[in-house]
Image (cartoon, rainbow, N blue to C red):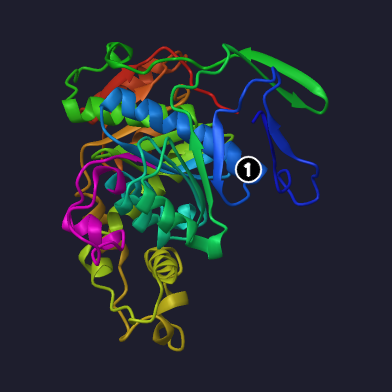
Amino acid sequence: MNEIQLKYGCNPNQKPARIFMEDGSELPVTVLNGRPGYINFLDALNGWQLVSELKRETGLPAATSFKHVSPAGAAVGLPLTETLRKIYWVDDMKEDLSPLACAYVRARGADRMSSFGDFISLSDICDEDTASVIHREVSDGVIAPGYTEKALEILKGKKKGNYVVIQIDPSYQPAAIEHKQVFGVTFEQGRQNLVIDDAFLSNIVTKNKELTPEAVRDIKISLITLKYTQSNSVCYVKDGQAIGIGAGQQSRIHCTRLAGSKADNWWLRQSPKVLNLPFRADVHRADRDNAIDVYMGEWPEDVLEDGAWERVFTRKPEPLTAKEKREWLNQLKDVTLGSDAFFPFSDNIERAHRSGVKYVAEPGGSIRDDAVIECCDKYDMAMVFTGIRLFHH
């Protein structure tokens, strides 16, 4: 098959819509269930590239959670701590989830608000554990190189049988030159085939030149994630997973702030007050996520005032004060920050420091590189200049 008819394009009024191979060859994807749309395939094909590169560079199963052609989260398959099991709402599942399932739980859980209704990409054959996690979340579809019989059965039962399941040929290699059209004009460029490996991280420009093995892994995760994130973009990573992604911002500092606020929220979810919020048993996971986001945010009264808290909690929680937030955030350490282009000002490093950043990777090349390096040195950060921009549009 060299063509698949889609439901519609980016919007329902944009018909007809299809994907096809211009040279008449076979498509590298097969739809096993459901009827995907245009954005589903954009998410699927970008996400597949991301997870396959993460698997290649880390040797671990990888997953990503895409929304509107940017990842909301990405992770490799490291075991889950008890705290992560709780904040990701899988503490009621078996403790020894497969590495692939752990990768998706982490990718989904880092920014659950953004991942609501996601499209999932998996680096490995989808197993029963991973399918069971996917089945309980609000999601549009999944792409993987294969599915076990039981996993496919579970996924086909989702969304009243309409859940999108796509299989991709892992051996597929696209042409070296790619094209797209905008307003009837065809654009052509060489594919972004940059390999982000250890050699890519050799130019450490700060006084602190120590990169732990975990830092090297996390820098790779940040940069590979950015490679498939709409620019401008910045990515915070800790312990093998993206914890904050700022995508599609016109200003670099706004990327850093946005991603930093998401990283902060990820860490605040692990604070004792948030962990022990007294949710009613009948409140669904998505509604709990919304309540937590409001509780930790600027207007906690929206969920704590009389008449509101009763709908979510069994008793009225104590507020999380600004002092308590800052004290908890001060415990966040050894975070990695990647940027798809150079930092033009040191304000980005100042903001990153407030979210526990220890390791930084960016292309370098700004006329203010010296000021950025000096700021990193002030906080004993180790910074790598990669020399390569990672814009994605």
Q: Which residue is drawn at 29% across and 58% down?
A: 268
Does residue 23 appear anywhere in the picture? yes
Q: Give the range drawn in magenta.
A: 74-101
Q: In which quarter of the image is the C terminus?
A: top right
Q: Residue at x 24, y 58 (%)?
A: 85
Question: Is 30 displayed left or right of 219 in the figure?
Answer: right
Farthest residue to the right: give it: 184
SS at mark 1 in the image: helix
Q: In this view, does 327 lie above or below 303?
A: above
Label 1, residues with CA under 10 Å away: few <14, some 14-19, many ≥20: some
Q: Report the front residue among 307 and 168.
A: 168
Q: In which quarter of the image is the N terminus?
A: top right
Q: Report the front residue among 228 and 31.
A: 31
Q: Report the front residue among 329 and 86.
A: 86
The amino acid pointed to by label 1 is Ile
Q: Which residue is drawn at 37% across and 35% down?
A: 123
Does residue 375 appear anywhere in the picture? no
Q: Is residue 389 magenta?
A: no
Residue bearing mark 1? 39
Q: In this view, does 164 lie above or below 46?
A: below
Residue 105 point in image, percent of width and height: 32, 51
Q: Is residue 99 magenta?
A: yes
Question: Is 104 displayed left or right of 275 in the figure?
Answer: right
